[in-house]
Image (tube, grey):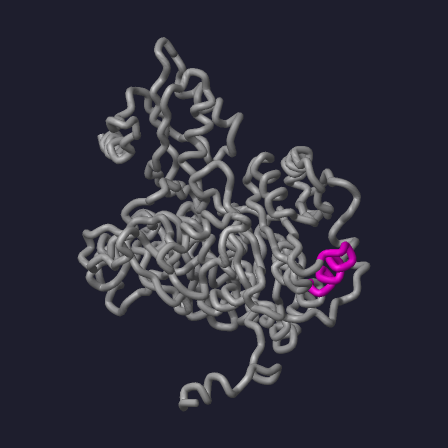
Amino acid sequence: MNDLCQFNDAIEKTAANYVSLSPLSFIRRAAAVYPDRTALIYNELRYSWQQTYARCTRLASLLKHFGIKRGDTVAVMLPNVPAMYEAHFGVPMVGAVLNAINIRLDPEAVAFILDHSRSRLLLVDPEYADVVEKALARLEGPKPIVINVSDPSQGEERLIGYLEYELLLAGQPELEDWQLPADEWDAIALGYTSGTTGNPKGVVTHHRGAYLNTVSNVLAWALPQDVVYLWTLPMFHCNGWCFPWTLAAIGGTNVCLRRVDPEMILGLIRQHKVSHYCGAPIVHSMIADAAVAVQEKFTHKVSGLIAGAAPPASVLAKMEKIGFDLTHVYGLTETYGPASVCAKQHGWDQHSLEERVRLNGRQGVAYPLQEGIAVMDPVTMKPVPADGETVGEIMFRGNIVMKGYLRNEAATSEAFAGGWFHSGDLAVVDADGYIKIRDRLKDVIISGGENISSLEVEEILLRHSDVEIAAVVAMADDKWGEVPAAFIQLRAGSQLSEDALISFCRENISRFKVPKKVIFGPLPTTSTGKIQKFMLRQQLRTDLST
């Protein structure tokens, strides 16, 4: 036996020297170290870390009461309220998998997710009762147990069935004997991404990755223990980019926000001395516009993470005017949210606004605990030169990459081809090693932080009897970052108007996916009939600039 083997093989893992990595560790520590520190604020509610931990363990006890066990899926359709935060701990405490559903989806999409995930239990806010009831009606197999999470601040509510979250929670003992997963590779969450085809794909993430990206958030943002974090980012987005677990790791304070309301946000920042928040460009822009309108100036530092499309110059300028500090991050559902960060260098703040926008608007470098990020030729799997010109595909490798797509081996194999996760985003590498997205390989439109599949929108457009050919591309938008624009070739003799087609889309698809502009005329195609979308994008840019 050589020296290397004696160190690697002769010493075994034991309970004394090895514990599975799981973000559940963080809340147990927060309750022990900061028992009286405020953990959650929502309207008039205040929960300490000790109280929050107790509520999470009672939720775990409640789930066990309903027969939920390791490997089962628990779905939630909730806004950013305390129950949503508690689910990020209570569900995995019993070994179950949290499936946080996008609250903006239509009944058809919700039904598919409930069915595909085989969700056994569903926590739902009464605000979404109509959508959920329609979704449940579409299910042919077993339906999940539905528990209503009532909100007294919303007035009269319509419940689905008779089970109510707070009443059930009050009757449950704390689950004191919950355990960390025996295997850190166990699934902790399931999140659905729209992708580019009709049905969304279920992204399975694990305890190890969630733990590591939780810590990555602390490192990338240099988070102190006295953070007051405002939940402008939906927790259904990649589990809030792992920030539910991050706030427990540092014993910070969560300020819950039911919906994005700029005036309310300003009030909460002022009242609670909010120090950090995250969101898509539109969220930051709305906050800045509201602050400028009332000439609001804050006496304390406020930092924000911005993701989605690259932040427009106008947004960065507005944020600077009100004294907010923005950092650009980039990632996907498959990478637990942020997987790269535009890490700021000394001296950048001395440049002109135009240059600062260019520097800070890039996708940047690998997140602290993401092993690798590269821009490579997807065929040869060789890195592109750092010349700012050669285009390749952004790829990730490391512990902060999903396990795979639920019951979709083909898509998983394709995503991991060559030993890297293929993002589908095309980018260049600047001379300083920072990555900059140039286009999207799969034509996914990012609008206000939401992914919109162009193929999905095209499919809806083609359902109209007057539409012969349809193509959807991203159109720049000051408010949303990007919105869908549709190019339509009508059937002979049709007099279909833009308003009529948009109304048709609104009846058949979620409103945020509806094209904001429709351009009629013959579409450019190749000799084989493939639509030349690059020409449509060029036409759109020309039309908008004139």
Helix, strand or loop: magenta stretch: helix
- Where in the figure is residue 208, as x and y percent of width and height? 52, 67
Residue at left offset 65%, top offset 40%: 127
Residue at left offset 71%, top offset 42%: 143
Where 151 sits versus 278, above or below? above
Residue at left offset 52%, top offset 87%: 11
- Where in the figure is residue 45, as x and y percent of width and height? 67, 58
Residue 446 magenta: no
Q: Farthest residue toward the top?
A: 493
Q: Quadrant of residue 517?
A: top left
Comparing 524 with 286, the one in front is: 524
Q: Which residues are magenta?
A: 56-68
Left or right: residue 148 compared with residue 22 = right
Residue at left offset 39%, top offset 69%: 368
- Where in the figure is residue 441, as x and y percent of width and height? 33, 44
Left or right: residue 249 compared with residue 83 = left
Q: Quadrant of the C terminus?
A: top left
- Where in the figure is residue 530, as x and y percent of width and height? 30, 30
Left or right: residue 393 compared with residue 201 = left
